[in-house]
Image (cartoon, rainbow, N blue to C red):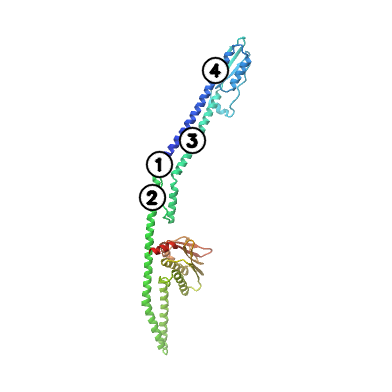
Amino acid sequence: MQLVTRLLIRLLAVGTVMMVIALVVTILSARNDIDHEAAASEKVGELLSILADFQTEAALSEQVLKIDALNQSETLRHFHIALLDASGKRLTQSPKQTDTSTPDWIKNLLVRDAKLATTSLPIIRSNGDRITVMLEPNPYSESTEAISSALLFLGLFAALGMALIVAIWVSVKLAFKPLVDILAGITRIESGDYKLQIASSSTRELNQIAQALNHLAAVLTEQIAKQRELLHRLQDVQEEERRKLAHELHDEFGQLLTALQVDASYVLKQSANQPELLACAQAMYDNSSSILSQLRNLLAQLRPYGLQGDEEHDIALEQALRDLVRQRQSRGDTALTCHLNVNLGSAVVPQRLAVAVYRIAQEALTNVMRHANAKQVDIQVSVDADSQQLCLRVADDGVGLQEQSAVDLQPNTSRGLGLVGMRERILANQGSLQFITTQPHGLIVEAIFPLALAEAEAKHD
């Protein structure tokens, strides 16, 4: 059902109920007026009977009391009865103001210029006494009834108006209730959670939006899975190329440099008595040794020891990280102190995840040495057994991220932060990457990976 149709049906039902209520109130008010008119007619008949008794021998005092009782009953509508003797003296009580709650200006506004002339009826009793029956009009009683009716219908209108407002509010709230789930679904999609489906709605338009968002989430899930698989393959290809390059360098250049170093050593021995030749041979030997040392460092970067897949994974990752720290400190600034703490417990880190953790730590440490001007860097790798998450944390006391937010994941790559490779490995392993600026200075690079998902992908591969 369409949203407009649903709202119209609900409002029509509410309007019908209100019309029924208004009709019932109107009927009850009309019945009350009819009852009052019937009672007034009875009192008029009673008045005629009393007036007829004036010509009999009945005591005048009794007739006066009956007239006062009739006036005080307030059933004679819109007029008051007065008895006057021959001298004009009032025998009955004067009319009393019955409505004191209504302001006079309202009464005068309703009555306006109504003529309040009295009607006199002379009656001669059987004993010859002359009395006058005078009808005194009272239009204010009609104004009181009008005000009461107006207040009644005004209250009814206010009640129906409030009921209509409440009904519209409830109807709109119920009609748009599925929007809460839709907005929650949009928030989840924005945060990267595409698993939970949005429930269907009985409103056609909102149901179409929910289905479109569910389809979007499914498409995004599929595309991210394809992107993650592509990143896995790309990183596998990169590691394979590094492995091949390391083998080529080791087999070709390593052997040549070793042979060159052996030849230089032989020339050194043979030129002991030739100073000029001895200096040249010594230079050849030192240069070949230096090149061979740099080659070993390069081979360690290309294919770190322990990540070739032929050792236990947790031992492999720890050993590779220790070699990384040792190599960087041996050829870097000796003023930089690096601490490494690896606590994997009994967790099994899949090979692909171990490589990703190593490469991110390698890039973070390189950035610290090149850009941070830090005195100390702490590398911590730990596993939370409860949440089954692996956390890599690299903290330094350097200059931090200058002119950038701590949560900016796309800084200027010309500054050498190398976040593109980090983000690719984070995305491929379904992890999260966070940059935290510390006070008074320094930066923390924190990468968190779900171990369960990594193990599932490793088994799938």
> Callout 4, which amino acid?
Gly
Disc 3 versus disc 4: nearer the observer: 4
Q: Is residue 298 above or below residue 414?
A: below
| Secondary structure of the residue carrying numbered label 2 | helix
| Secondary structure of the residue carrying numbered label 1 | helix
- Numbered disc total: 4
Q: Residue at x 41, y 66 (%)?
A: 352
Return the residue at label 1: 4
Disc 2 versus disc 3: nearer the observer: 2
Among the 4 quarters of the image, the one containing residue 108:
top right
Q: Earlier in the sequence, mark 4 or mark 2?
A: 4
> Callout 1, which amino acid?
Val
Return the residue at label 4: 45
142 on left or right of 299:
right
Q: Residue at x 38, y 79 (%)?
A: 257
Disc 4 versus disc 1: nearer the observer: 4
**Would residue 410 be seen by someone viewing this image from the given angle?**
no
